[in-house]
Image (cartoon, helix red, strand yellow):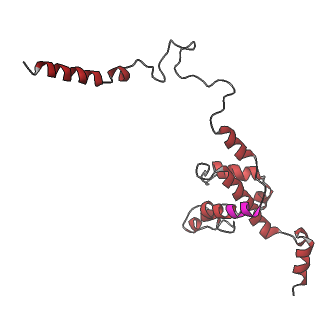
Amino acid sequence: MRNGPAIFVLCAALLACTRSNMDDQPKYQEYEPAPLFRNGRVLQAAPEGTVARGDAARFRDETERPPVSAQLLARGRERYDVFCSPCHDRVGGGEGIVVRRGFPRPPSLHDERLRQTGDQHLFDVIARGFGAMYAFGDRVQARDRWAIVAYIRALQLSRHALLSDLPPEERARLEARP
């Protein structure tokens, strides 16, 4: 009987350490009725005007085009080479490596239709995809999408630039060459 009090203390200590009161709390499941709320539902809509964390910045990045700079074009070229050139090739002609291996040929980025379309459309196509093109919105951040759009515009300009588009000093330098 000498072990009796020690066994009792040990059992009491083990019972005190259990977390059954935390694990067995009453709770509602997501889709079951809940008399706690007036509408009887557990899942409640967010209050009107609520903005999820990060949504305001994400919206700003998706709607505000950054100014075109050498850094933006360099970033656009880098991202274009990674995400776009496998299908559109490095100059935008639509003859990328996957096309040579049987994937459907995308339109040339130099087509008049794509040259005339707005920048927002190109941005949205990169984000959401179009036709056989996959959506890259989950892999390419909004700022990088704008950089890619700027680089696509530079590619388009490279094939359709007029001599009159150049600054006078560059035009004179080109005209002076034999």
Q: Position of residue 82 (x, y in %)?
A: 60, 62
Total numbered circles: 0
Q: Is residue 157 left or right of residue 20?
A: right
Q: Is residue 105 visible?
A: no
| Residue drawn where x is 67% and y is 50% of the image | 142
**From this viewpoint, which residue is outermost toward the front?**
2
Q: Is residue 71 magenta?
A: yes
Q: Would you say 2 lies left or right of 116 here?
A: left
Q: Is residue 13 above or below residue 135?
A: above
- The image shows residue 77 at horizontal and vertical percentages of 68, 64
The C terminus lies in which quarter of the figure? bottom right
Relative depth, front residue between 38 and 9: 9
Q: Main secondary structure of the magenta part?
A: helix
In the image, farthest residue toward the left: 1
Quadrant in the picture for residue 100: bottom right
- Quarter of the image with the N terminus in it: top left
Say which residue appears at 55% left-offset and 14% top-offset: 37
Q: Is residue 60 above or below residue 152?
A: above
Highlighted magenta segment, given as a residue range: 68-75
The residue at the point 10 percent across, 22 percent down is 3
Q: Position of residue 66 (x, y in %)?
A: 76, 53
> Residue at 39% across / 19% down in the picture?
25
Q: Nearer the viewer, residue 89 or 132?
A: 89
**Which percent across, then down, holds residue 35?**
50, 12
